[in-house]
Amino acid sequence: MATTADIKNGLCIVKDQDLWMITEFQHVKPGKGPAFVRTRLKNVKSGKVVDNTFTAGHKIETARVEKRAHQFLYKDDFGFHFMNSDTFEQVMIEEQMIGKSAGLIKDGQEVDILFHAETELPLTCELPAYVVLEITYTEPGIKGDTATNATKPATLETGAEIQVPLFINLGDKIKVDTRTHSYGERVK
């Protein structure tokens, strides 16, 4: 058991027989009345985000979770298949657990999978903040057309489509932000 003093971002707690991850918190000490901790909790299974307030000193039950490095192997009708980089065990994860970043995973991609330590159940799959992907299709760029912030659609090697600046051409490698699905920079 922990108290509200132990609350930090990324802490996984058990609330109402469900696992919740703390994404934001703020300790508030009003001039009148007791102190409290305002939190934003994300349900690990469903992805639902709720706001919750704990009074100072409230006991909370923490869940033991482990982050393990895995490598993407392949995708089929059942989901995405990953291999543990240390033990070579394979685990299957459904597409909704990965979220909108599922279209940015390429063969051999390293990801971190969060497991519930007691049940060995995979909870979330986190891609690196940026991935380097090659442009497989886009309209040709025009030389000198970099003064405006205009963009054009481009298809990546994974099949995902994002908006890129006009000077990006077919075959260019770019960094893509996996959190926002946006263009980061061109890679040499």
Image (cartoon, rainbow, N blue to C red):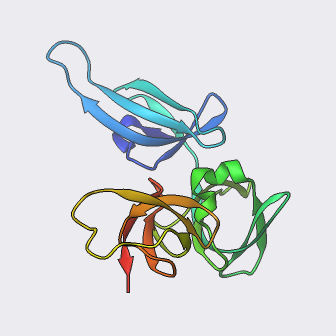
* Image quadrant occupied by the C terminus: bottom left
Quadrant in which residue 142 is drawn: bottom left
Would residue 152 be found to the left or right of residue 68 on screen?
left
Q: Residue at x 59, y 51 (%)?
A: 100
Say above or below: 48 vs 9: above
In the image, farthest residue toward the top? 32
In the image, farthest residue toward the left? 31
Residue 129 in view in this figure: no
Would residue 56 be found to the left or right of residue 123 on screen?
left
Residue 151 in view in this figure: yes
In the image, farthest residue toward the right? 77
In the image, farthest residue toward the bottom? 188
Relative image position of residue 122 (x, y in whole percent) = 69, 56
Relative image position of residue 152 (x, y in whole percent) = 44, 59
92 or 78: nearer the viewer: 78
Say above or below: 54 vs 172: above
Relative image position of residue 37 (x, y in whole percent) = 33, 29
Would residue 33 be found to the left or right of residue 69 on screen?
left
Relative image position of residue 136 (x, y in whole percent) = 58, 75
Would residue 52 be found to the left or right of residue 86 on screen?
left
Say above or below: 137 vs 43: below
116 or 101: nearer the viewer: 101
46 or 142: nearer the viewer: 142
Q: How many marks?
A: 0
Q: Residue at x 20, y 25 (%)?
A: 29
56 or 25: nearer the viewer: 25
